[in-house]
Image (tube, helix red, strand yellow):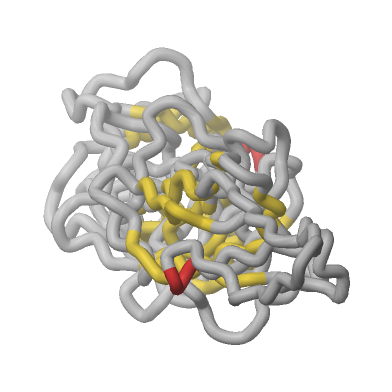
Amino acid sequence: NQGGDESLDSDADATMNGMTNTVTLASGDNYEDLDAGLYQPASLGDYVWEDLDGDGQQDSGEPGISGVTVSLYEDANNDGTPDGSPIATTTTDGNGYYSFEDLAPGSYIVGFDTPTGYTPTTANVGNDATDSDNVGGYTGTIVLDSGENDDTNDAGYISTGTSLGDYVWEDTDGDGLQDSGEPGVSGVTVNLKDAGGNVIATTTTDGNGYYHFTGLVPGTYSVQFVLPGGYEFTQLNQGGDESLDSDADATMNGMTNTVTLASGDNYEDLDAGLYQPASLGDYVWEDLDGDGQQDSGEPGISGVTVSLYEDANNDGTPDGAPIATTTTDGNGYYSFEDLAPGSYIVGFDTPTGYTPTTANVGNDATDSDNV
C-alpha cells in the first residue's frame, strides 16, 4: 500500500502470510488491483583490517581485526546521514569480517566503532573493493537492489601505538657504545622528520636522556639530534648491536638513517652518543740541574715540535702518523684541544743542542714524561 495508486502498489501483507484486504464484487465487476510485489533479500558487509603500512589499501598479510562493533542504519532520503538508531548491530568475526543479511532493497549506511588502540586509516584511496570506506565512523550511502550482495564496505585502522625513540647518552670513553655507568644527557632537542625531510615533531630528552615520538602513522621517518653546547657526536655505528650504538651522523648535522614503521611498530633504537671535548698538553723545559723535575727558575723551551698520535689498542706504540702537530709557545707550553675521548701518545722532537733529561722521576705533575 505504498503511494496513492492502487493499481501500482502491493496488496500482499507480509505480516498476514501474504493476505490482501477483502474486496466486495458486484455482478459483472472486474477487479484488477490485487497485486503482490516481491524482492530477493539483499546483503552487505565486508572487512575490518589493520592497515600495517597506512596506505589505505588491503595488502597481502595485513590482518583483520576481530570484535569490532558494526551498526547498520537506514538512509531513506539518501542524504548520507543515518536515519535515527541502527536497525541492526553485529561484530566482526575472528578474521575481521562482518555481514548484514536478509535486507530489503533500499538505502543504508554502515557505522564502525573505532576499536581501542586504533585510529582510522585514510579512506577512499584506490580500488573501492580493497580500500577503506570509513569516513568519520560511517560509510557513504549504500543503495541495494533486490538480491544484491554488496561486499565492498570496509574499514581500515592503524595502531595508535606506533612510535619511535630511545636515548641520548654521554659516551665518556668515546667508543661509540653505551657502556655501563655512562649517563644519559637531558634537555637535548630531537626533531622527527618525514620521508620528505620535513620536521613534523620536536621533543627534548628527559632527565635520564630518553625521548619518544608516539601516535605515529605508518611511514618512513628519520631523527635529527640537535647538538647541545659543549658536546660533540661520538663515533657512528660501532659494534654489531643497534640497541647500543650511536646513530647520529656528525657529518649530517646529527641526522639518522631513515626507518620505516608499520602499524603498531615501536622502534627504540635511534640513539645519539655525545662527548665533551677533551684536551691534553703541558710544558717543555730546560732541566738546569738534571734532576728530572721542574724546579723554580728553570725556563721553558719555545718552538719545540710536539705531535699527537692515537693509541687505540693501548699498546704504548703510536698508531701510524700523527693526527695533530703543534709547537711550544714562548714559555714552553703546548696544548691539543677538542679531542674525542680515547687513548693518545705525545711525541716530542728533541730540539737542537739538547738531549732528554731523566724521565718519570718523582711527582708526575712536574716530572718529564718523554721516554
Residue placed most toward the observer, 349 or 230: 230
Q: Name the side, left or right, on which 188 lies relative to 202.
A: left
Residue placed most toward the observer, 241 or 370: 241
Farthest residue toward the front? 27
Above or below residue 345? Residue 187 is below
Which residue sits at x=76%, y=63%?
9
Q: Quadrant of residue 211?
A: bottom left
Residue 223, visible in the rendered structure: yes
Q: Residue 305's spot in the image, x, y percent? A: 54, 31
Q: Quadrant of residue 348?
A: top left
Which residue sits at x=43%, y=52%?
101
Q: Residue 198's spot in the image, x, y percent? A: 75, 51
Residue 212, visible in the rendered structure: no
Farthest residue toward the bottom? 84
Which residue sits at x=25%, y=27%?
240
Above or below residue 91? Residue 148 is above
Q: Residue 39's spot in the image, x, y percent? A: 59, 48
Q: How many marks?
A: 0
Which residue sits at x=36%, y=80%?
207
Residue placed most toward the observer, 219 or 41: 41
Q: Name the side, left or right, on which 65 lies relative to 200.
A: left
Q: Residue 21's spot in the image, x, y percent? A: 60, 75
Residue placed most toward the observer, 3 or 82: 3
Q: Name the side, left or right, on which 163 lies relative to 23.
A: left
* Quadrant that contains the C terminus: top left
* Quadrant that contains the N terminus: bottom right
Q: Name the side, left or right, on which 214 lies relative to 108.
A: left
Farthest residue toward the top? 320
